[in-house]
Image (spheres, grey):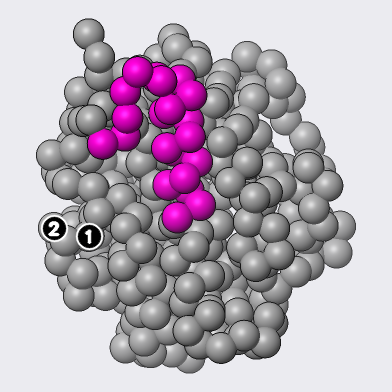
Amino acid sequence: MASSPRIRHYLYDDGPLILDGGLATELETQGFHLQGDPLWSARLLHTNPQAIRDAHGRFLLSGADVISTATYQASVEGFIRHLHVSSECAKDLIMSAVQLAKEAVKSFVSETHPSTSVQSGQRCPLVAGSVGPYGAFLHNGSEYTGDYAEQMSVQELKAWHRPQIECLAAAGADLLAFETIPSIKEAEALVELLREFPNTKAWLALSCKDVRSLSDGSPFADAVQMANRSQQLIAVGVNCCPPQLVEPLLESARCLLRPEISWVVYPNSGEDWDSEQGWHGAETEMETESSPLIEMSRTWMKQGAALIGGCCRISPAHIAKLRHHLKGTCEPPSSEP
């Protein structure tokens, strides 16, 4: 895990951290058929790891300060069920996702700063271990509602997530990304579980259905208050929602966020998704400077967002424009004088 001082340096000394975009949708643009797959991009950890490494590399070259592992839909049970592998092999696959991301970072650093190395103390991008909701494993759309949490206890949710988090932490992810969490009960379970890994930092990004509520109907403000109690969360916020929801969501809990925690924001393109047709609807003009992600990002930064990026349908090109808009550079700066 990255040290706390290193993460604090990234967050507060050089403006917002630029996150990557939609890894799975980027892989789909490269010709991989992932829609409808119960493992989504995680299947490529088994079948084509090089494709994942290359996708990470494209986001890094576009200016991402943080890349997230291809483990959003990865789980020990899921790999056993859908890949017919052993428990140990499943754990190795989850750990390999961290290694692939670290290899992409090392390659990026050596290519852009050939006179230095990752070990020399130079500032280099971080690897976030992606942890998706239990509903992603169920593969029945419940990850967008959080309904399953009503039938599960906090302890059951902790037991489900524990093997994945153990693998990501053991593999050396710099921090964890709890992503698209639709239920306040599941968010609570993850925050509690994080205490079992005292040297691990994380952010908590929630799935929200409107300007005040999580997908399960719980107030966003209540989830922020719950997150405030964690000494290991560096940020709380929202991901994979339309960009237009972000500002009012953050405003709804503006007075509740304690100074030690920042906002994390990475919305999708604003298009609609369903299991039969995929992404469709009012497509945003993401290739222009007037896209919602670009237009609204400075407002989020003024609201206190220290980690800003994109989710589904946000490509490396969009991340490059976001970085230029917020930081005026196309490449993460070196610590060299």
Work out whether 76 lies above or below 12.
below
Which amino acid lies under the numbered mark 1 shown in the image of this protein? Thr
- Label whose residue precedes the other's in the sequence (2 or 1): 1
Tell me: 306 left or right of 324: left
Q: Residue 186: where, in percent of width, then height? A: 39, 74
Task: Please name which of the two marks, 2 or 1, marks the residue nearer to the observer.
Answer: 1
Q: Secondary structure at mark 1?
A: loop
Q: Residue 56: where, in percent of width, then height? A: 56, 41
> In terms of secondary structure, what is the magenta stretch mainly?
helix
Q: Foreground residue, 124 or 294? A: 124
Question: Where is mark 2, residue-wise?
Answer: 231
| Mark 1 Cα shell of 10 Å, populated few (<14), some (14-19), many (≥20) | many
Q: Foreground residue, 83 or 320? A: 83
Q: Would residue 172 be counted in the magenta stretch?
A: no
* Residue at (25, 54) in percent of width and height: 1
* Residue at (63, 37) in percent of width and height: 314
Work out whether 224 lies above or below 112.
below
Q: Residue 190: where, in percent of width, then height? A: 32, 71
Instruction: Tell me which corner region of the image, top left, top right, bottom left or bottom right, holds residue 119.
Output: top left
Q: Which residues are magenta?
A: 99-119
Is residue 172 shown to the viewer in this render?
yes
* Res. 200 mark: 1
